[in-house]
Amino acid sequence: MVGCAAFYTAETTLIRWIGPGWPAPVTLLWREVSAIALLLPFVVHQRGKPLRTRQWRWLTFRSLTGTAGLILSIYAIARLPLATSTTLSFTRPLWIMVIAWLALGEPFGTRKVVALVLGIVGVLWIAQPAAALPDLSAAAASIGAALLFAASIVSIRFMTATETPLTIMFYGQVLGLAFTAPLAIWSWRAPAGFEALILLSVGVLGLGTMACHVKALQAAEASVVGPYEYLRLPFAMLAGLVLLGEVPGWIGLVGAGVILSAALVAAGKGRMQAGSEEPKPEEDEEFHLPPDADWTTRRIRAVFEEQLRAEVALAAAHMRDPYWTDNRTGHNIGHDELAAVRFMESISLEPTAEENDDPELYAGWILRQLDVVAERFRKYAPDPDGYGIATIGTVKRNLRQILMRGE
């Protein structure tokens, strides 16, 4: 994540350096072209497997929101001090929290309310007249970009159960290019040789940011990785001061502290307890069955086991199909999917008597244990293409949907 923060800071510094004279869609077009050029060899190496997808609707939604967010973000970065635009981007976790509550029904407890209030206070503090922001419209664009990025990230939760990171990233760039091209043509400005190099570098650095983030999530739990994202702020302050001569004022520093506090409160405590190497389930995430649902713990257990059998059958089908075997390494993704099922089978399906008597507690317990298994699988199981962790996500998503439909 240190590399992720460094790539992001370098990218935003270049955007800030070329200034507002470059239309945001044109900058984004060059960014997407260079990213596609870098990703295409990986797609070809895997014989086009990342092009297979069952999530066209979500990929399109993610590309639309991501593209719009990037245009607003580039517009804001080019016009605001680097530290200010970076600080306002930290409102993204707050938007994710709200969207996940509205769209996914995730709990919205006291901790999240406090985080939201702190975030609003921080934004209002930075935007006050005494702060003398050079462009209020750019500040509004930065907050709007954070909202759109949040919607894009929440949409990824629907895709990671079936799609690999390469599929999501490649289609994000290709569809994004299709959405950006008309705007870029309309506001086209041809770059000189050095300017073209700078614009292509923006794309390379942006892809480096994404790659480092994905690699970090493969190597450690999300709760461990998340706090390191805030390294972007000191990096941005240093780059702004040394390279651009931007000295942050006390109002900006106080606002940054408030917004960072809000983001950290929203993130909550990690799943790893101090001195423990095993992940623990979240205790504050409650699951509620529909009021009219007629579930029993025995039926819930049967549905869960049925989902595991379905994934075993899918893994077996993949192992029989040479399409899913890497010619270079001989590795078949079905082995990763089957390994994920074995991890899930390790879940004890007989919790305490109290939970066993209450279907809602029992269902919530299984869903939390699937989170624990996912973290353990990331830590201990080789999963080069991400299909193993996607299998766990598929089981959790399908189980949750079935329970909420009351089937």
Image (cartoon, helix red, strand yellow):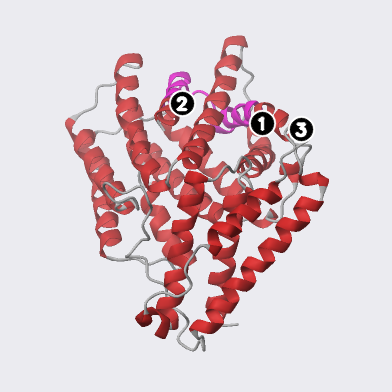
Q: Which residues are magenta?
A: 9-35
| Disc 1 residue type (three-letter) | Leu
Q: Residue at horizontal 77%, vertical 39%? A: 48
From the viewer's perspective, is residue 147 above or below residue 240? below
- The image quarter in which residue 58 lies: bottom right
Query: How many numbered discs?
Result: 3
Label 2: which residue? 7
Residue 294 is a magenta residue: no
Which numbered circle lies on residue 169? Answer: none
Badge nearest the viewer, 1 or 3: 3
Marks 1 and 3 close (CB-CB < 8 Å): no
Label 3: which residue? 44
- The image quarter in which residue 35 lies: top right
Task: Say whether disc 1 or disc 2 marks the residue closer to the N-terminus.
Answer: 2
Secondary structure of the residue carrying tag 2 is: helix
Separation of residues labelled 3 and 2 (CA atoms): 25 Å
Q: Where residue 220 appears, x then y in whole percent?
A: 43, 42
Judge the density around disc 1: few (<14), some (14-19), many (≥20) Cα neighbours within 10 Å. some
Magenta portion: prevailing SS class: helix
